[in-house]
Amino acid sequence: MSKSVLIVEDEVKLATLLADYFKLTDYQPHIIHHGDEVIAWVKANQPDAILLDIMLPGKNGIELCKEIRQFSNVPILMVTAKVEEIDRLLGLELGADDYICKPFSPREVVARVKAVLRRTQTINNHIDCLQLNELRLSVSFGQQEVSLTAVEFQLLKPLANQPERIFTRDQLMQDMYSDHRIVNHRTIDSHIKKLRKKLADISDGKDWIQAVYGSGYRLVI
């Protein structure tokens, strides 16, 4: 079954060229030139991947990426015309899956989209094994289940929903405490340590949560 790719690009010739290359590799491309049309289309059509330019009329790519991440984990590849923009995008931690800088080869773009789809498919196939139950405040792996505290569950949920994405301690803190209390980063580290042990106990010692030096934590497959 062919995959659908949304190309959000206001340069008509470039968007058409990319669409032609995707068609040659059995993808179904759809083009949108204006940022204000994107959200409604994504919600209605649920594409397999989105190629999202930053500079757009209406809502820009950064706004759109943030908004899409509120309701979907669809793979997003951000496109920028400035090399130095990549560092700023990474600093914003938008939740994009890849970043591509113009000018680029259409073949490279197709290859990058394929690579992201392969990676996310592998993640999805594996993460199905780790099941969160919000009513029971528990997590299970295969036939093994362990109870979590409310704080541990809220800490694990964003990590499990977006595996391989790095979350800062501040981002995790916002999910853990709805009252926005001020918490020392060591408190986060302490909860992570307990959560790691519980997950390891139900999965033959697997270390699910990785610390990323100077950044935060991510769930690894």
Image: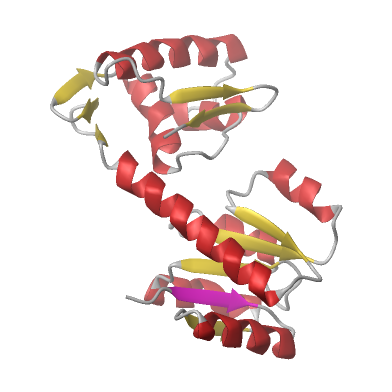
Q: Magenta-highlighted stretch: main secondary structure?
A: strand
Colour scheme used in the picture? secondary structure
Question: Is 6 colored magenta in this rendering?
Answer: yes
Check the picture and name the quadrant holding the N terminus. bottom left
What residue do we see at 46% from left, 16% from top? Answer: 192
Res 55 → quadrant: bottom right
- Magenta residues (range): 4-8
Q: Residue at x 57, y 33 (%)?
A: 167
The answer to whether any part of residue 178 appears in the image is no
Above or below for 40 versus 177: below
Residue 211: x and y, percent?
Answer: 56, 21
In this orientation, which residue lies closer to the viewer: 55 or 47? 47
**Residue drawn at the location 45% of the way across and 26% of the way down:** 176
Residue 202 visible: yes
Based on the picture, tell me whether residue 60 belongs to the magenta stretch: no
Report the number of numbered marks: 0
**Which of 164/173 is in front?**
164
Picture coordinates of residue 139, whole percent (x, y): 25, 27
Q: Which residue occupies 73% across, 66% down?
A: 54
Q: Can you give x and y, in whole percent of width and height, for residue 153 in the image?
A: 34, 26
Judge whether 43 appears above or below 127 on screen: below
Q: Nearer the viewer, residue 68 or 26?
A: 26
Residue 56 position, x and y percent, is 73, 75
Report the residue that reaches farthest toward the left. Answer: 143
The image quadrant that residue 162 belongs to is top left
For the C terminus, the quadrant is: top left
Taking 99 as reference, is 34 above or below it? below
